[in-house]
Image (tube, grey):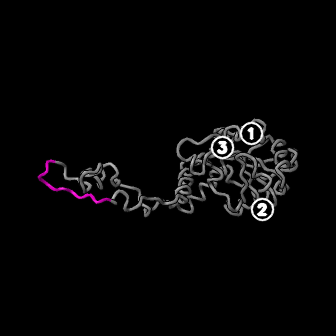
Amino acid sequence: MKVPVFDLEGERVDELELPAFFEEPVRKDLIRRVVLAFQANRRQPYGTDPRAGMRTSAESWGAGHGVAMVPRIKGSRHPAAGRGARVAQTVGGRKAHPPKPEKDWSQRVNRREKRAALRSALAATAKPEFVEARGHIIDEVPELPLVVVDELRGLRRAREVREFFQNLGLWADVERAKRKRRIRAGKGKRRGRRYVKPKSVLIVVDEFEGIELGARNHPGVDVVRAMELNVEHLAPGTHPGRLTVYTPSAIEVLEERLGE
């Protein structure tokens, strides 16, 4: 499978033979399994205070009083006296089955499965039907997968990266990500993750030479080294087909890393 190589102005300057994994079938089930494992493995354990709901003087009155034998707060002539406490069915009592910090959330995935999922996710970036299904705008993108000369990694200014996106037809997708940013539903908005931000373009290079600075301020754009590329970069939220830009050197690194 041969694809053209474009320069920063959007002109064809060369042709590149892609590795075989770009033509592999897309295994959605495998990609989903690996991405969910990544998410589970960075989940922080949490749990309740072991003494929550137990800080009380309550004791059961025992049998013979004509009331339920739940523990009751001691004392008399005050509003709480005689009120049920401590047990799960009472107001302010302990939880029946609270979350426990010792629970292990991690998931193990075989190395061969991770490797197969990565190859499959790379193949999805070369198939327009998967890229469009993720919601990316590719009407003006000249080729998938999009391969751009190695000079891309040296763009240090946001203005230079914006011009590159406009020349290659990628700017519409960046604007989509900016337009679709929204306030998160639920309590997460007051826990440091107020906004939900869509993903747009992923740039894969062999080494950082400034592109990580020039691209970081564009909505939804990520830059990653080929040696650090994983399934979650290529299939955010378990959905394969992210709009991805490669450099020829990055593809060489991926070929050495994944082989034939």
Badge 2 vs badge 3, beta-carbon distance below 8 Å: no
Instruction: Please check the rendered image and state whether residue 60 is part of the magenta-colored stretch, yes or no.
Output: yes
Return the disc, 1 or 2, that comes first in the chain's sequence: 1
Q: Residues within 10 Å of mark 2 (few under 14, many from 20)?
A: some
- Asked where in the image residue 39 lies, by quadrant, the reply is bottom right
Q: Position of residue 33 (x, y in %)?
A: 53, 53
Q: Which amino acid does the dot numbered 1 rest on?
A: Glu
The residue shown at (63%, 51%) is 121
Q: Which mark is residue 241?
A: none
**What distance separates the C-alpha of mark 2 from that of mark 3?**
25 Å
**What distance separates the C-alpha of mark 1 from that of mark 2?**
27 Å
Q: Which mark is residue 198?
A: 3
Return the disc, 3 or 1, that comes first in the chain's sequence: 1
Whether residue 76 is situated above or below residue 138 in the rendered picture: below
Q: Main secondary structure of the magenta part?
A: loop
Q: Secondary structure at mark 2?
A: loop
Left or right, 90 with respect to 227, comes to left
Q: Which amino acid does the dot numbered 2 rest on?
A: Glu
Q: Name the residue nearer the viewer: 181 or 11.
A: 181
Q: Residues within 10 Å of mark 3 (few under 14, many from 20)?
A: some
Left or right, 57 with respect to 221, comes to left
**Of the residues tagged 1 and 2, which is closer to the observer?**
1
Whether residue 31 is situated above or below residue 112 in the rendered picture: above
Q: Which mark is residue 207?
A: 2
Left or right, 248 with respect to 64, comes to right
Q: Which residues are magenta?
A: 56-66
Q: Which amino acid does the dot numbered 3 rest on?
A: Pro
Q: Which mark is residue 175?
A: 1
The residue shown at (62%, 51%) is 120
Q: Residue furthest top?
A: 139
